[in-house]
Image: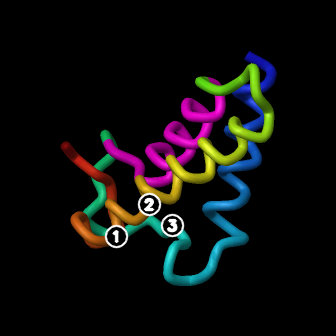
C-alpha cells in the first residue's frame, strides 16, 4: 500500500505540473463531478506499477506506459477529458 500511494502521489505531480502542454491535464468545463481525468491517469499508473511490484524496473515502465496510453486515449477520443467507457 505504501508503494501504491507513493506512485500515486508522484504520478499526480507529473501529470498535473511536469508534462508538456500537449499532455497536461486541466479541468474542462464539460467534466462532471463523477469523473476526473487526472484520477484515471493516476490510477492507471499506480495499478500497472503495482502489477509488477516484484520487478522494480518493469514496474516503472509498466506504470509509465499505462498512464501514457490512458492519457493519449483521453486526448484522442474524449477531447482531453475523462474517458467514459
Magenta stretch: residue 27 in it? Answer: no
25 versus 46 height, above or below: below
Location of the N terminus by quadrant is top right
Whether label 2 touches label 1, CB < 8 Å = yes
- Per the model, the C-alpha gap separating discs 3 and 2 is 8 Å
Element type where label 3 sits in the image: loop
Q: CA distance from mark 2 to mark 1?
A: 6 Å
Residue topped by disc 3 = 25
Callouts 3 and 2 close, C-beta under 8 Å = yes
Magenta-colored segment: predominant secondary structure: helix
The answer to whether 70 is drawn above or below residue 45 in the figure is below
Whichever of labels 1 and 3 marks the residue nearer the N terminus, that label is 3
Residue 58, image x and y in percent?
70, 38
- Residue at 50% across, 53% down: 38
- Residue at x 43%, y 56% (from the top left corner): 69
User: Is 82 located above or below residue 34 in the figure?
Assistant: below
Name which of mark 3 and mark 2 comes first in the sequence. Answer: 3
Query: What secondary structure is found at the residue carrying circle 1?
Result: helix
Residue 41: percent from the left, percent from the top? 50, 49
Q: Which residue is mark 1?
A: 75
Relative to residue 34, is residue 70 drawn left or right?
A: right
> In front here: 12 or 67?
67
Which quadrant of the figure has residue 78? bottom left
Residue range of the region highlighted in magenta in the rendering: 35-50
Q: Which of the two discs, 3 and 2, sits closer to the camera?
A: 2
Residue at the (60%, 42%) spot, across then down: 62
Q: Tell me whether circle 1 and circle 3 mark residues in contact (CB < 8 Å).
A: no
Instruction: Please identify the residue farthest to the bottom as the structure is shown.
Output: 21
- Find disc 2 in the rendering and name its residue: 71
Amino acid at each position: 500500500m505504501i508503494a501504491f500511494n507513493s506512485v500515486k502521489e508522484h504520478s499526480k505531480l507529473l501529470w498535473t505540473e511536469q508534462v508538456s502542454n500537449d499532455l497536461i491535464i486541466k479541468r474542462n468545463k464539460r467534466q462532471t463531478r463523477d469523473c476526473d481525468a487526472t484520477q484515471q491517469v493516476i490510477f492507471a499508473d499506480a495499478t500497472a506499477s503495482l502489477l509488477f511490484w516484484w520487478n522494480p524496473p518493469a514496474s516503472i515502465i509498466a506504470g509509465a506506459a499505462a498512464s501514457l496510453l490512458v492519457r493519449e486515449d483521453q486526448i484522442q477520443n474524449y477531447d482531453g477529458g475523462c474517458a467514459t467507457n
